[in-house]
Image (spheres, coloured by chain):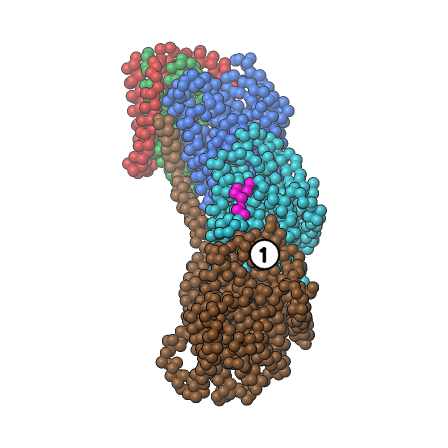
Chain colours: A cyan, B brown, C green, D red, E blue
Amino acid sequence: MILVAFIAILMTGGIIAWIAASWSHSASRWISLVTLLVDFSLAISVWMNSSGLEWIEKFSVPWVPDFGISFSLALDGLSLLMLVLTFFLGIFGVLVSWNEIQERVGFFHFNLLWVLAGISGVFLTMDLFLFYFFWEVMLIPMYFLIGIWGHENKRYAAFKFFIFTQASGLLMLLAILGLYFVHKSNSGTGTFDYFQLLGTQIPLGTSRWLMLGFLAAFIVKLPVVPFHTWLPDAHSQAPTAGSLILAGLLLKTGAYGLIRFVVPLFPEASAELAPWAMLLGVVGILYGASLAFAQTDLKRLVAYTSVSHMGFVILGVFAFNQLAMQGVVMQMITHAISTGALFAIAGVLYERIHTRDILAMGGFWGKAPFMGVVTLIFVMASLGLPGLGNFVAEFLTLIGSWQANPMLTIFAAIGIVTATAYSLRIMQKVFLGKWQSEKAMPDLSLREKLIFIPLIVTIIWLGLFPQTVINTVKPMIDKQFKIEQPTSIQNNNGVQ
Amino acid sequence: MSLWLIPALPLLGAFVLIVFGQQLPKRLIPIIGSGSVGLSAALTFALGYRFISSSASSFHIKAWQWMDINGFSPAVAFHLDALSLVFIFVITFVGFLIHVYSAEFMVHDDGYARFFAYLNLFVCSMLTLVLADNFVLMYLGWEGVGLCSYLLIGFWYAEEKNGYAARKAFIVTRVGDISLAFGLFMLFQQFHTLNIQEVAAQAAQHWTVGSETALIISLLLLGGAVGKSAQLPLQTWLPDAMAGPSPVSALIHAATMVTAGVYLIARTHVIFELAPDALMIVGIIGAVTLVLAGFAALTQFDLKRVLAYSTISQIGYMFLALGVSAWSAAIFHFMIHAFFKALLFLAAGAVIESLHHEHDMFKMGGLKNKLPVVYWTFLIGAGSLAALPLITGGFYSKDQILWLSLAGEHGHIWFFLAALVGAFVTSVYTFRMMFLTFFGKENTPVGHVPGKGMNIPLIVLAILTTVGGFIELPHTFGHVTFFSDFLKPILPAVTMQEEMESFEWLIQLVAALVALSGVGVAYYFFIYKPDQADELKSSAADLHSFWLSGWGFDKLYDKLVVQPYVYLSNVNKNDVIDKLYESVVTVANWLNRILAYTQSGILRWYIMGIVIGGILLMALALI
Amino acid sequence: MQVSAEYGLLLASVLFTLGLIGVLVRRNIIFMLVCVEIMLNAAGLAFIVAGSKWTQADGQVMFIFILTMAAAEVSVGLALILQIYHQLKTLDGDAANSMKG
Amino acid sequence: MQIAFYIAAFVAVLSTVMVITRFNVIHALLYLVVSFMAMAVVFFILGAPFAAALEVIVYAGAIVVLIIFVIMMLNQKEEAVDQEKKWLTPSVYIGPAILSVLLLGELIYIIYEGESHTIGQQVVDVKEVGKTLYGPYILAVELSGMLLMAGIVGAYHLGRQKKKVTHRFLKQTED
Amino acid sequence: MEFSNINIVDVLPGIFLVTASVLAMLSIAIKRNHIFIFVVTTTSLMGVFLYLIFYASNHKFNVEPLFVIDGFGTFVTGLIVMSALAVSLLSYAYFEQREERKEEYYILLLLATLGSDILVISKHFVSFFLGLEILSISLYAMVAYLRKRNKSDEAGLKYLILAAFSSAFLLFGMALVYSASGSMDFSGIASYVASNPTLPLPLFAGMCLLVVGIGFKLGVVPFHMWAPDVYEGAPAPVAAFIASISKGGMIVLLVRFFDQINGFQYPVLVLAFACIAVASMFIGNILAIQQTNVKRILAYSSIAHMGYIFVAFLAGGELGKEAVSFYLVAYFLTIIGTFGVIAILSDHDRDAELLDDYKGLFWRHPKIAMVMTAMLLSLAGIPLTAGFVGKFYLITSGANAQLWWLVIVLVVSSVIGLYYYIRIIAMMFEKMEGTDELALHPRLYLINLITLVVISVLIIFYGVYPQGLIDRIRDFLY
């Protein structure tokens, strides 16, 4: 039941916040904050009490029994981590919008909470139909977040976001149906239940197509070059909370889908695809970095860094080993935090100087050193400095993918150098250099500090003590690699 | 065991300074900054004493398990042995002196607390680097020092070019870093561990000499080393790194960080010895670097750039030593170099400070009397750098390398010749710098005169520079082997080519003569007949500017890598792939316009549509 | 009286096509309406032919319904034409094209 | 009697061609009457006397008269004929004609593909039609009543003269 | 007269509608009263619906020779009647504020509903034809109902000429089929077809001409061109009627006819329908993308939606029928709701049909904007709405029948479709200051708003809990 509660609390919170706004704007804000805090603490308490079992919680009631659709939720380590992340970032989503959003506050918080509810649903559901359902449900509020409270080019961005994700989502729906029918013809019963579909025997040819359907949705969401072009627009045009959630959570649903569905459901087909997928990952890493380097819009820049960083995810997922997979999970979490924080910085700057153009910035360190330090830390996180969480993620991914494909790993690692280039460019253009403007540039306020300090603590904690996270997902990853590790990694200790 | 405190104390200092830096009274900042490093230094002494007096070959402490995934289990654990002890001694002690110096040097700067915070963070990272018991933690330190170097080079952030230099330093060293990372990946693939000791043990066990894997791995590690240590071909960042404050140059870009590569190779010498080809490449890189950097130093007019090239050149010596398996000689030269180069940088800092931030040597001169302490200490440092015979530490350390480059097992006459040429050039540019700065007539009035806080570190370093040399004396000259004995458990002694034994004195004599003749040449051109220098310069203007630009490497990389990358990025700023999708939209709109044309609003046209539909359907029936 | 059924249907087809041509080429709305009537009539003929072919009354019954429908349609159509003529002052079918795209 | 069929058919086709090519509406309508008459003959020949009668009464009678009434109401003048001349140019009718010929070709081909059948031997007389109509198709007759009702109501509403009615809520907004 | 073989109760819905329309006409003769006639209309529609719910038997039987009463038909009849009720609820306010005689409209509405109902239950060409014509002739007048508007007349004229023209095709086709098979009864044709190994050419050609007529009514490519003009010119409630009810009957008839003659075994026939489906989906959606008139957008959208339904229709089988039924419910609700929004926003001079009329709607009338958003999302097939479940049903049935290419076309074209639905939504959420008053009287406004809210609640309810409706459909179908 607690799994339902996670989603239900968010949804009811959203509705109450909407209603409350007609009474007072700050009531709406407080309600959302409290809602998220409640969910967050619930999730933490589940985490604390979780045993080392693969499935921590399960819940299932029939929904459309005629089709074998059930409202089925389950929680394992991966879902748990993602869930905690969702609520954690959700809190900051509310906090960063505290002053930014002054219009239709209630509707804003409604959308915010419903996006989060959709995302939680995606992370929790174990019914493929329901998964698709939540997959789409999270789009609409996100569309509104971008389309209503976004920046100057919001309509275009919202359109693009919506159409890209919908188009790919529909392909996934086709694949889900294909899988349903394959299973039905194999076993006689039609079901969308993940656990029952898991072992379906699919002819390789069919399997390839079905996997591509799933893959389409996930790599667009992730995004993988060349399906990324919705992302810079959506990220740069969204309000701060929107960017935070897009970068921090929505992209992760793609990664989550890859881990949860593509690889376990289509082991052979994905093994076959692996080199190409990894290649796409590498292309993404380098291409994203190169584009990030050229941008002058701060949010756009950060958006392209996401493209680059998410390349590591697909690289790691298709490396098929535990190290890489752990790296991917770490990457999902740490990227969420570091990029989320960078978007929050961009938002904070926008509130002060009303521009996102980094050429119009410079020398802010002198006025706002605290902000400078914060930015520095997250810039460093984004370039993968050891000691911060992203390093653990990237290092694990690379060390894992090296064992699968050293050549591609070399190119992937070049991405680290290019990451350095664009990351330092942020620092240089915004905080270093000469102070250009006469405008006042107040340092972070208490509320803003409340946003950034926990994020900093988390990113450092993840960098130094990643074992907590590793242990949480370990049962799930162990299970996966026992089932379908296509070719065992050669444990080559021998002399060459 | 308080081993973990050694890196932890500076970290604590850094933390305090970052978080509370703004609020702290100015007086307290240097106390926290220097104090934490000072405590570390004191601890190092105590620990060193215990280490030497105990019979243990290493101290080990594990703070916590960092990660543990299916055999990949790096811990945050420190490992102290003779090699790391030498390093942490230099780091904490020289670091402490530089902190003390900085307390006065930086006192008027706005970012006083920030400066100390960075320095402390650097010391912590460097200590982690050398104390790490596994490669992953070492990599943490490795990148940490890179970060601090970046932050400190760009310390005066308002200047655009400082920022540029800082980024260049970070990015160029990162190129080396990923090579190192590849090395680690391969090591892990081979041995399923990244613990340094275990790797060494397994390598010795599993690989034969000349093993291809060993070669690849050692070359990858070397890649990391040349990046950090500013060796060919990744040396270009170091001269620019002089944009940072002088203490930074002293600490990071002379004494400690840039020698991380030396440390890495020494640390993994087991692997390198299994790959003789790699060793030879190390030697060649060292030899070529030291000559090239020497000539580049010869033409610089920025005081600190001379020192920067000289640093590159001196590290070249260390690499040369590593390349001929003269491990302890390399470490010995590292230590002595740390002393005198730190000294030179600090002194140069004092000079520049007193001349209102004037960097151009040709605008200096006649400072001998104005800044006596600086003059004398600088002289001692310069002597050491030029390896003036007998009285300087530099002589003993460099002489050893010269000798072993010829007589060592892997020695070669070309190595020796390169080293000899390098020694001569070193001597020339060192005294060119000396003469231009302190002799001749006063070109710029002296402003600020350094106080006690700056003088004392200079003096201490001067003493160390001189005394330090005497802990390791050649066979022919006292034969003290205190240092190499100390390192022997870790770093094996060099095997000599036997037929060379008898030539040692001859070589030393040659070296001494070369050093002295270099001084002589410098005297001739810069004191005796300065016109000749100008003539020479103008007669070979192209060569001069070529050397001045550091053999054109910057330009080359700029043209080859940087500009194409920036160009391509900017060309593709709006993402060509996006255009692809836009063209889909265009096609859709185009189709829409065509189809909209059919919706003409004219009734008969619509009827025609129905008729055509009917005809087509009937046609289908006929098929 | 013996006629081949094909000839009957052929006549219906020819009339149908003539009506079709009429609808397509005439711009006068009244002509269009008339031509549609011709087509309907042709269809009715086809029904009659088919009815006689099977010697059933159904063909004629259908013809009667077609007749009914044609009458109703013409009446509504003419009323509409009157309206249009009041507004556009023309019977040009092509002139009624204010909606397009 | 086959000859009678051919003659009637010929007349029907010819007069229909005249209908669609006349510039003057009234002329066209007169040809239409001829066409309908010829059709009635055809019906008769085919053994459907009742249908033939209805054809004459309803089509040639009622419907054509209705149209003529409307034309009279519209008061078409000579210009209308000129207008028609202008409208009916080759460029206008070539395309549709080709299309129609295509369709006709298809139809002819299809009709000749079907098996041959001789018809018209047996007359389906009024009685039989009546029995069928008021037997199985009684509900259809009811429905045709509804059809006519729809036509009447529609024609009544559309053909009514305009009368401006101002709504009570809208009185204030209008001047 | 022989009524002996007809059980009055079986055709009661039709009789009910007939009675109501006659009653309405008589009441006009006595005294024109909008409210009265409105009440008569709504109560009779409600009565039919209640009758269907409580007394309609689920087993299949025939009313020879014209009608067939079965679950599928009964279900869609119920749907049609309910939709007519919704349309008439929306019409009241719409016509109340216009300077026309309103009363005849309800007669026509009832008759058109009757026509559609006849189509649903017919199994014979005669009833098919009569149902179609009752529907069409009522619609001619309904489309042109607002005589003051040029557009309305123009639309009426276009619709009339084209509908009559396509009826001629339909009739000629029927005649060919009749002449080939000797029967106008579907079952008779089916037995003739079954007795022939291959489809005789004249019969097949007749069917093609039949399809022209059917295709015209459904507004599928290439018989679709009238749709945008007529939707644009017709009053909003009438457009809703055309988009939903007039198509529903035809779809059921098509399904029934095709089922009966077992058209699935003729690849050419299937190919013909597949081509029509693909063309409708693509062309319908592409035509809409740059359109700025909301009514025209909806016309194009309905072309595409008919294409979608064809996928389930071609899939056939029980699943196909279920999918068609479900989709019809979702689509009817949605399209009526959408036109309801247009109606509510229209003033007495013109309908709120331009995209600009929707600019900033969210800031002016948040409630209406939310309703419209729900409708558009449902049209686009986004989850949480009935449109999504409907589309899912269609895709499922298509996938089940291995019609992968059609299904893929459906998916791809509905992505194109997304664009223009989203465009309207985006328009509504565009920032705009100030609020303006609705042209409607508050009380009238309330009726419409309640109707719309009920419709949107239903849309969302069926989107979240489709099982109830699915069960209902299955109850009726089997």
- A447 sits left or right of B263 in the view: right
Dot 1 surroundings within 10 Å: few (below 14), some, or many (20 or more)? Answer: some
User: x, y (%) of residue E319?
Assistant: 54, 28
| Residue in view at x 30 percent, y 21 percent | D11
User: x, y (%) of residue B205?
Assistant: 54, 55
| Residue in view at x 43 percent, y 36 percent | E279
| Residue type pointed to by label 1 | Glu
* Res. A348 in view: no
Q: Nearer the viewer, residue A77 or A433?
A: A77
* Res. A174 in view: yes
The image quarter containing residue B123 is bottom right
The image quarter containing residue B346 is bottom right
User: x, y (%) of residue D151?
Assistant: 48, 28
User: x, y (%) of residue B344?
Assistant: 54, 78
| Residue in view at x 56 percent, y 80 percent | B347
**Does residue A490 show up magenta in the picture?**
yes
Q: Nearer the viewer, residue B375 or E401?
A: B375
Q: Which residues are magenta?
A: A484-491
- The chain ID associated with circle 1 is B
The image quarter containing residue B37 is bottom right
Q: Nearer the viewer, residue B622 or A422?
A: A422
Q: Is residue A121 above or below residue B233?
A: above
Q: Is residue B146 above or below residue B430?
A: above
Q: Is residue B534 above or below residue E439?
A: below
Q: Secondary structure at mark 1?
A: helix
Q: Main secondary structure of the magenta part?
A: loop
| Residue in view at x 38 percent, y 14 percent | C52
- Which residue position is annotated with label 1? B198
